[in-house]
Image (cartoon, grey):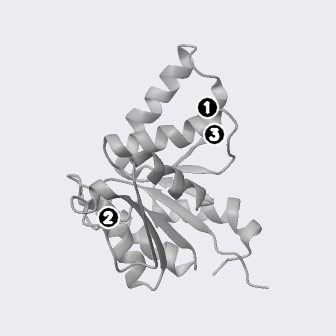
């Protein structure tokens, strides 16, 4: 009986951002996913740090599952040279397909789309629709304002303190690897 493959959903920017550290961490993450024998689930674009993650995973021989809506195929340069490409009609369907085909979520720096993706999976967790781990890759403290906002929402009585427990911020890909390994590897039996 084959060992099931761990699938990691990566939400991140379709732009490179101003800090080269974000692209470097994206490349490290893609290589990590491939090295561990895991599958990358991502937005199927070949631009920004989204493209960096995918190119790195592919270069290291990783399995890549991409999901992109029809209307973004040209703008995000939909990547056809991946293991699986799913083309959806809407952004919402894209998120749902990505999430359904993954065991954990990692959120790298990004813009409004990345924030939307993070808050949707966080909300799904808050209302009990899943128990998948959610990680923020907090390179150079990028996510500190977001974490502060979540804590503010809790302090103002708009969410229970448990909301903060539904995601983990890690400062590096190395820390993420340890966290993913501790939470998921025992269930999947892959520890390359």
Judged from the image, the secondary structure of the residue bearing numbered disc 3 is helix
151 up-or-down from 111: above or below: above
Picture quadrant where residue 161 is located:
top right
Q: Position of residue 124 (x, y in %)?
A: 60, 38
Tell me what residue is drawn at x 68 percent, y 41 percent: 129
- In the rendering, which numbered label is found on residue 163? 1
79 up-or-down from 68: above or below: below
Observer able to see residue 170: no
| Nearer to the camera, 132 or 81 | 81
Tell me what residue is drawn at x 24 percent, y 66 percent: 77
Q: Nearer the viewer, mark 2 or mark 3?
A: 2
**What residue would you read off at disc 3?**
125
Q: Is residue 59 left or right of residue 129?
A: left
Tell me what residue is drawn at x 31 percent, y 44 percent: 111
| Residues under numbered marks 2 and 3 in contact, where contact means CB atoms less than 8 Å apart | no
Q: Position of residue 107 (x, y in %)?
A: 45, 51
Observer able to see residue 157: yes
Q: Is residue 51 left or right of residue 116?
A: left
- In the rendering, which numbered label is found on residue 45? 2
Judged from the image, the secondary structure of the residue bearing numbered disc 1 is helix
How far apart are the alpha carbons under marks 2 and 3? 26 Å
42 up-or-down from 31: above or below: above
Judged from the image, the secondary structure of the residue bearing numbered disc 2 is loop
In this rendering, the count of numbered labels is: 3
């Amino acid at each position: 009986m084959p060992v099931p493959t761990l699938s990691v959903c990566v939400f991140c920017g379709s732009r490179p951002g101003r800090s080269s550290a974000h692209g470097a961490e994206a490349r490290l993450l893609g290589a990590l996913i491939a090295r561990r024998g895991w599958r990358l689930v991502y937005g199927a674009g070949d631009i920004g740090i989204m493209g960096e993650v995918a190119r790195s995973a592919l270069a290291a021989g990783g399995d890549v599952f991409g999901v992109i809506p029809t209307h973004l195929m040209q703008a995000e340069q939909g990547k056809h040279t991946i293991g699986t490409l799913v083309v959806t009609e809407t952004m919402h369907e894209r998120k749902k397909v990505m999430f359904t085909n993954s065991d954990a979520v990692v959120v790298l720096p990004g813009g409004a789309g990345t924030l939307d993706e993070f808050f949707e999976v966080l909300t799904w967790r808050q209302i009990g629709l899943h128990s998948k781990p959610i990680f923020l890759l907090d390179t150079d403290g990028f996510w500190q304002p977001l974490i502060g906002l979540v804590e503010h929402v809790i302090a103002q009585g708009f969410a229970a303190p448990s909301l903060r427990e539904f995601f983990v911020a890690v400062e590096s890909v190395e820390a993420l690897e340890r966290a993913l390994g501790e939470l998921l590897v025992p269930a999947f039996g892959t520890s390359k």
